[in-house]
Image: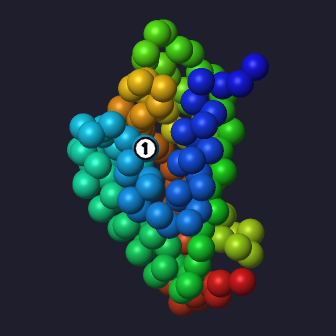
Amino acid sequence: MKSAFEEYRKRWAEAYNRKDLRALAELYTENGVFYGGDGSVARGRRAIREHFEGNFAEYEKIIPGVRPHFESKVEDEEVFGDIGYEFGSYKITAPNGKVLVEGSYSGIGRRIGDTWKIARHMSTGSVVTPAPEKKLEAV
């Protein structure tokens, strides 16, 4: 059976992997909220877009020219009419396989018409960085 969130989860990963900030932000409701693992809170699409722009800039400092790859594994999800939730684990890797971040996430989705949008998204994770005297190179 196809997951209720499968389509937006796929579009989220694709937009992230392309570093497509506009497409990523559009997957959230207009007043969506992203809670970052670092304690940051981004309210609204513009702030969410800026949050991910900052993430990509941080990865660039770790590995110049990196194109991070996001993948997730859903642990559970439930839908109640036009509202649903999901939670699972994720990791973000560099093309050379180096793990940049790994953690867990939870989200609340809202169906608007035929489309699911993310209303609330919480991410916890550990950023994996190289030792200060070393920089990794993109592969």
Furthest toward the front, the residue is: 113
Q: In this view, does 8 lie above or below 36?
A: above
For disc 1, the marked residue is 27
**Quarter of the image with the C terminus in it:** bottom right
Residue occupying image coordinates x 36% and y 67%: 54
Task: Evaluate whether residue 17 shows in this view.
Answer: yes
Q: Which of 126 and 86 is in front in this view?
A: 86
Element at label 1 = loop
- The quadrant in which residue 14 appears is bottom right
Q: Which colour scheme is used?
A: rainbow
Q: Position of residue 79 (x, y in %)?
A: 53, 14
Locate residue 34, reporting x and y percent: 35, 43
**Residue at x 53% of width, y 48% of height:** 12
Q: How crowded is mark 1: few (under 14 residues within 10 Å), some or many (20 or more)?
A: many
Quick check: 27 left or right of 96?
Answer: left
- Please say whether residue 131 is visible from this viewpoint: no
The quadrant the N terminus occupies is: top right
Q: Where is residue 135 in the image (x, y as percent from the top left)?
A: 58, 87
Name the spot of residue 30 as percent of width and height, x first.
27, 40
User: Is the residue 119 above or below the residue 66 in the image?
Assistant: above
In the rendered view, does 89 fall on the left or right side of 96?
left
Instruction: Give the number of marks.
Output: 1
Q: Which residue is drawn at 43% across and 17% down?
A: 83
Amino acid at dot 1: Leu
Furthest residue toward top: 80
Query: Is 2 left or right of 49, judged from the image as shown?
Result: right
* Quarter of the view holding residue 129: bottom right
**Residue at image coords 41%, 75%:** 57
Q: Which of 97 and 110 is in front in this view?
A: 110
